[in-house]
Image (cartoon, helix red, strand yellow):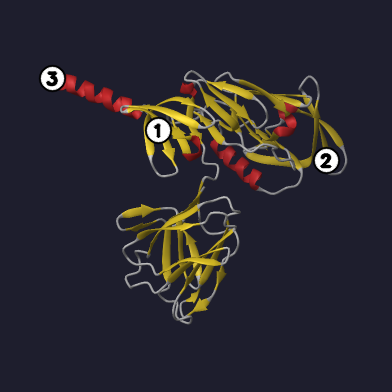
Amino acid sequence: MIMQLCRAMCLAILFGSIAAADEVKTLSGKSVVGTVVSLSDSVVLVKTPKGEEKVPLAQVLAVELRPAKGMGTEKYSDVRLLDDTVLHCTKVVLKGKDVQLTLPSGTALSLPVNYVVSIWHEAQNAPLRKKWEELLAQRVKKDRIVVVKDGELNPLEGTIGEVDAEGKTVQFRRETGDVLPITLDRLNGMVFHRLEVPTTSPVCKVIDTQGNTLMAVKVAFDGKKYQVTTSFAANVSLDPEALARLDFNMGKLTYLARPEKEPKAGTGIAGEGYVRDLADAPIAMDGQNFGRGVWARGPIELEYNLDGKFKEFKAFLGVHPDFSVESKAVVTIFCDGEKRFSESPAKAMRAIAVNVKDVTTLKIVVTTPDPFNNLHAQAVLAEARVSQ
């Protein structure tokens, strides 16, 4: 009995240490598991059971440290910035041209108001937060102030002016031209219509255990503290235990779905060609589940703008499991008009790769030998992605 108890305790310690380990995920698909010792502009140093391993930062997609707990039901405000930073704040103070933010950890930030895109004071209320997200999705070229009444959001469009020096009122110009002094305590939300863009590009999303997301232009770790430089020129020092994830992807690895540009579709016996996003209808091929990529029936052309930023295109080429007959599709990939791949999919899926270095436009064309019969001209490109 004592031996069994000791064995159980050892297993608990072993699996507990594994669960608590850091994980560095790379572009190649390799993961390095251990303890992050340091992080610089060029390398992440990880202590593993086999010794220390250096991972070039250019190859790092993410550093997974621990799960994010979120904010729970505690009252807090959400503040969004121009660079897509999202901060959960226990205190938001607007004074003049500046805003002071206090995070749940006690970390304080001060930045110009013109970096702020929106402020929402009911972030802990899930139903209201959903309505708030829907309001933010509306494309309105005006500032808005928002008051909640009877569970509904009541936005008023106009121009938000300066906040007084005491941080009590804000000048709001209505579309009629009237200027009203609005008491800040009465407002549940503020939306600023911004045309400015950040002058520096982030290299990493720093996500803490409470769900705050800081867009960082620089991240360093000396083994004791993470030093984060934000795109709004603030320097933030964070304890390792406060961080959940460092996301270095920033476009290094981009999954392709239905393209933004309307696909060019032809017609046949089965009707017009079409494309489906696997995120909307996941499938299984060869015993594997896929929820990213595209399923297309030809004739159709899918066009993606790569802007010369990527080096490689990869996917798993196969057929939809709901089709029992052999596919007669031909999948051809063009890079800036040059044909670099052409093949018919089979029931046994296979991994494909295409060099897209310096390519501006990637075009995936699904056709059939018989231009009038597209009944079986279907193909799946699961996990279709481009990487830098």
- Amino acid at pointer 3: Met
What residue is rendered at 35% in x and 53% in y?
289
Q: Residues within 10 Å of mark 3 (few under 14, many from 20)?
A: few
Residue 77 found in image quarter:
top right
What residue is rendered at 36% in x and 32% in y?
33
Q: Residues within 10 Å of mark 2 (few under 14, many from 20)?
A: some
Residue 352 found in image quarter:
bottom left
Nearest the camera: 336 or 187?
Answer: 336
Taking 373 as reference, is 131 above or below it? above
- Amino acid at pointer 1: Glu
Q: Secondary structure at mark 1?
A: strand
Mark-to-mark CA distance, 1 and 2: 52 Å
Q: Is residue 350 visible?
A: yes
Considering every residue shown, the one lying at the far right of the view is: 177
Residue 163: x %, y % from top left: 79, 27
Q: Residue 3: which numbered mark, if any?
A: 3
Residue 72: x %, y % from top left: 49, 29
Q: Disc 1 vs disc 2: which is toward the camera?
A: 1
Sequence-wise, the earlier of marks 3 and 1 is: 3
- Amino acid at pointer 2: Arg
Work out which quarter of the rendered image holds the N terminus and state it: top left
**Residue contact at pointers 3 and 2, CB within 8 angstroms:** no
Q: Residue 23: which numbered mark, if any?
A: 1
Q: Disc 3 vs disc 1: which is toward the camera?
A: 1
| Residue holding disc 2 | 174
Sequence-wise, the earlier of marks 3 and 2 is: 3
**Residue contact at pointers 3 and 1, CB within 8 angstroms:** no
What residue is rendered at 48% in x and 62% in y?
276
